[in-house]
Amino acid sequence: MTRAPRVEGRRVRRLGLAAALLTTVLLAACDPPKPANDCAEIPGLDKWTWVGGATDSITNKAKWHHPGEDGIGFPGARTEPAAAADDYVCVPDDRHLVIRDGQSMHIQVLDNQGTTEIIPGGRLDLEGNDTDRISYSNIMVLQGMLAGPGTLTTVAGGELHWQKTINGGTSMRSDEDLSPSAPPAKTVIAEGGTLRVSPGGVQLANLRTIVNHGTTQVVGNSAYIALDDGTSFVNLGTFDFLGDGDVLQGSFASPRDLPLFRNEGQVRKLSGGSGQSTFDVPFQRVAPGSQSVTAGRLGIWHDTSITASVALGARFGTGACGAGANATCTSPVLNGTQPQFAEVQRATGAGSPATVSIAEVPGLGEPLTKGDPVDLTAPAASNANPMTIRLGIDSTLTGGLAASALNVTHDGGANLPDCPASLPIAGACVDRAASTGDAGDDVVMVVKTPSNGRWRIR
């Protein structure tokens, strides 16, 4: 059918607040596969094929192939709202499309077999769905904004590079027109696909969910994902920290629920960073999900027990940041949100990674206890080579006492003695030189011990 020539411009939807819940649909282990016939015709949609290169503008009409109407216009133009219902863009495997600063493309479906870049100030709106109008991508560089209710799937062998640059922020978000029963938009990383976050901070906003079946990598010490209220990250594959990056809480948007990181795959703090990576958002582990620490430190905000496989010399903890350097992290805890943390460092030396479990136990504090008791289960160490425990509490729980005036008990016994200046120790003891916090400040009490048990600050 012959279509009327297109005119430039297209309405851009204003992003607003909408309440939605994470549904079981979003957590499904399988997402619809990519059609076998690349850039096939999709019933009811109007296909535009990019024939330009990385240096060409998307507004150059000569760079679009539109059967029978080459050179008449371009897809996703802003002042033709009706066209958003049917525009479908194909980027062939030998083509490179760039959405530049000040440009936007507002379409139903993208089949990106080649490379698509959205640079700072650029925007791609996908108005499809998660059934028969899914967008697929091979290589995408996202430095601007991805928006709209449509699902975007990075295919097996494909890569989504999510990057903040010095020229502006970058985000993925849903569309504002979400009914209470509609699922939020999804970004899916297929099995064999990769999401790579680096450098700096990126934002997941406005109820969008990322579902990772493949591999997600947070690369470098400054990289982090900020999850706004109402968003979620569902890990069904592998989530790796390659450095000291974080997953942090982003913007607060009451009355939306807090953001959620749900782990049904593997979360790994790997080599490449000697400092701390933190999940500063609610963290939900669902079987068979697992956590492991090969190097450095991993802290997970969790309100029950949390377990990880921890290498010798590595650190694993609950609660908020032990020594975070990124935007919303404080040391040692988040005031009024997560008022304490506990961290274990396995004894150094030869040996394989082993399971460490930590549980903050609310409601069992004694009258003199500061904060909640902490249960610890880890492989036994020795007096000559003890494990190290760090118990951190917010200044609101210290009663105005400095670390030098506080004590630690083990299994409800007497106050622990001070540790000697050098190893071996004679049993569990408080390392006064390493314990920190003046009167009115957050406090970290450091314990050296060969054994497990329940620990209390008093």
Image (spheres, grey):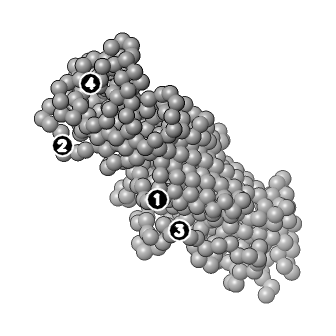
At mark 1, the secondary structure is loop
Query: Along the horizontal axis of the image, is 359 left or right of 247?
Result: left
User: Which label number is shown at residue 364?
Assistant: 2
**Which of these two is toward me, 220 or 165?**
220
Q: Does 287 sit above or below residue 71?
A: above
Q: Identify the residue under disc 1.
A: 288
Q: What whole-number distance in Å separates the C-alpha atoms at marks 2 and 3? A: 38 Å
Locate residue 381, reporting x and y percent. 39, 30
Nearer the camera: disc 4 or disc 2: 2
Other residues around mark 3 within 10 Å, as few (<14) / some (14–19) / many (≥20): some
User: Which label number is shown at residue 29?
Assistant: 3
**Which of these two is toward me, 139 or 343?**
343
Residue drawn at point x = 58 percent, y = 70 percent:
31
Residue drawn at point x = 69 percent, y = 55 percent:
159
Q: Does 236 sit above or below residue 4?
A: above
Q: Of callouts 4 and 3, which one flags the residue occurring earlier in the amino acid sequence?
A: 3
Q: What whole-number distance in Å separates the C-alpha atoms at marks 4 and 2? A: 24 Å
Q: Of callouts 4 and 2, which one flags the residue occurring earlier in the amino acid sequence?
A: 2
Amino acid at pointer 3: Ala
Q: Of callouts 1 and 3, which one flags the residue occurring earlier in the amino acid sequence?
A: 3
